[in-house]
Image (spheres, rainbow, N blue to C red):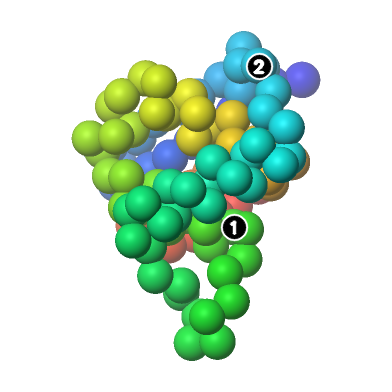
Amino acid sequence: MSSELIVRFNPQQEWRIDLSRLEPMGMEEARRWLDDQFTAMECEPLRASGKVLLADKVLLVAQAAGPRRLDDADWRTAYARATHAILVKPMITIDVAAMAVTY
């Protein structure tokens, strides 16, 4: 079964990562990695309540990282591994422009 993460900023800026070729990341390691990135990039919660859903965190980290970090193969691989571990879906699309995560 194919497994892929797509991060899209616009139709001309899209990264496709084949998840089946990556070593899986454990859930706790993935949560820690995303939490560290969320904090380091000074991301703000989307909801007025301050609650941050896992899908929100994945989206906000991609938004804050921007194309520059996604162009970095090491960072992109770590992001893909963490996202896959957290969301546990074979096909994931992070559409930053639409502020949407779809499976």
Amino acid type, mark 1: Ala
| Residue 61 in sight | no
Q: On the picture, is 22 further left or further right than 45?
A: right
Q: Position of residue 27 (x, y in %)?
A: 73, 40
Q: Measured along the vertical axis of the image, is residue 85 above or below residue 60?
A: above
Asked which quadrant contains residue 23, the reply is top right
Query: Distance from label 2 to label 1 (Cα)?
Result: 21 Å
| Residue 8 in sight | yes
Q: Measured along the vertical axis of the image, is residue 82 above or below residue 9?
A: above
User: For this rendering, which residue is in front, 83 or 32?
Assistant: 32
Given contact means CB atoms under 8 Å apart, are the residues at marks 2 and 1 in contact?
Answer: no
Which residue does the numbered mark 1 point to in the structure image?
55
At x 50%, y 29%, the residue is 78
Q: Measured along the vertical axis of the image, is residue 35 above or below residue 79?
A: below
Q: On the picture, is 89 further left or further right than 31?
A: right
Amino acid type, mark 2: Glu
Question: Which residue is outermost to the bottom?
Answer: 48
Q: Position of residue 73 (x, y in %)?
A: 37, 20
Which residue does the numbered mark 2 point to in the structure image?
23
Q: SS class of the residue under badge 2?
A: loop
Estimate how packed mark 2 is, as few (under 14), some (14 to 19) or many (20 or more) residues with alpha carbons within 10 Å. Answer: few
Asked which quadrant contains residue 15, the reply is top left
User: For this rendering, which residue is in front, 8 or 55?
Assistant: 55
Q: Position of residue 69 (x, y in %)?
A: 29, 34
At x 52%, y 80%, the residue is 50
User: For this rendering, which residue is in front, 81 or 4?
Assistant: 81
At x 33%, y 53%, the residue is 41
Q: SS class of the residue under badge 1?
A: helix
User: For this rendering, which residue is in front, 13 or 42?
Assistant: 42
